[in-house]
Amino acid sequence: MVRWVLNRLRAVRTPRDFYILTRAPFLLALRALMAQSWSQALAQTVETAYVAMNIRHCYGPRRVRIAADQLVVVSLVRDGERYMHAFIEYYLALGASQIVLLDNGSLDQTIEIARRYPHVTILSSKLNYGQYQRQLKSYLIRRFGQRCWSLCVDIDELFDYPGSRQIDLSTFLRYLRAYGYNAVVAQMLDMFAQGPILDRGKPTHEDLRVAYPLADVSNTDWREYHSAFDVQNQLASVTIQACFGGIRKTIFDVNVLLTKHPLLFLEGGMRPMDPTPHAVNRATVADLTCVLYHYKFTGGFADLVQRAVLEENYFRRSAEYKRYQEVLDHNPLLGIETPTAWPVEHTDELVERRFLVVSAAYNNWIETQRQRSRPAPT
């Protein structure tokens, strides 16, 4: 019903159209094909309001005051208990001021585990993930990311930035604001451990970085940024590129897009999650890239694949997950073992291997901050 109303509203342009709406809906459908106007924005507003109406508060602060050099982490999650301890503890240690979780119908202990931690807000919505993924994530960013940095990540992603061993998070965020950036590109890096993929126990409270230390960037496909993202962003560096493939291409022959825009400072006419969940529109993108350590191949991977195939709620009706299922059905003992894999210790290695890029200005910023933090000679 809501979809029907939204589709009709998109065709409304004048008061007379409202009259026609009740008498000749097919004429409005024809007009929608011929011209799109302010009514499209109206329909989007109605849809945004509908999403907000279907989100309820469960636990933690409803409103969070965060300074411009601080970070709120937001995540849409469903049945994420196996990641929850590691996720929250990692981001609190990184320096996040608040974590906001939007639960999307979990049947496990996701909410119960999250409630044990301070600085965590829990919301809930039962809207269909496949239909409303972008809108739900955009809601989180717009509600909690006003006048501060927001990091929108999945529950199996751990964010890190170049130079994190030399400067803290607030110093990194101050650099971005000092140069006028409001968006940062991050490349997903699939992490794994030796041995069969399906022979991993379901973790409940383990350090993901220790349990899954390996990565392989040898089979990546780099493309010009705007060939992958149809957006009106300003790039601060031509070295920013879109990345495809990686270990998933090696093992499963799926050439997925690994590039996202998870870190945003919402301002002006920026459009988060537009036109896809990996994108942002009308933003000024920083002159460096960060990493999202991605822990897909952990305990519970088989359950995730089976549910995605059954529900068809991911991109292209879960085509990627159907490929996973096909390969695993053929080889249940499949393991990830490649001669070019190595245990990742820090982001500087990823810069050295050219998986991440940094600018001279950022390197100079790090050095300046390090010199300032040195104790004065006595």
Image (cartoon, rainbow, N blue to C red):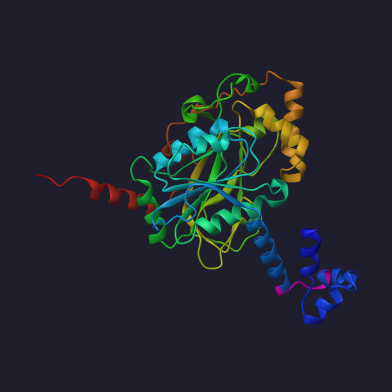
Q: Quadrant of the C terminus?
A: top left
Q: Residue furthest left?
A: 378
Give left or right: position of 323 versus 135.
right
- In this rendering, does residue 352 appear at all? no
Residue depicted at 81% across the width and 67% down the height: 8
The reply, left or right, for residue 171 in relation to residue 333 is left
The location of residue 340, given as percent across then percent down, is: 55, 27
Q: Nearer the viewer, residue 18 or 312?
A: 18
Residue 218 screen position, x and y as percent: 57, 34
On whether residue 137 falls in the magenta region, the answer is no
Give x and y (percent) for residue 30.
87, 70
Is there any visible trace of residue 306 in the rendered image?
A: yes
Q: Along the horizontal axis of the image, is 9 left or right of 199?
A: right
Residue 160 position in % (x across, y down): 45, 42
Q: Which residues are magenta?
A: 33-38
Q: Residue at x 50, y 57 (%)?
A: 145
**Against 50, is 14 above or below?**
below
Relative vertical location of residue 334 with respect to residue 162 in this rendering, above or below: above
Of residue 233 and residue 80, the one placed in the foreground of this image is: 80
Q: Quadrant of the N terminus?
A: bottom right
Quadrant of the rendered structure where residue 349 is? top left
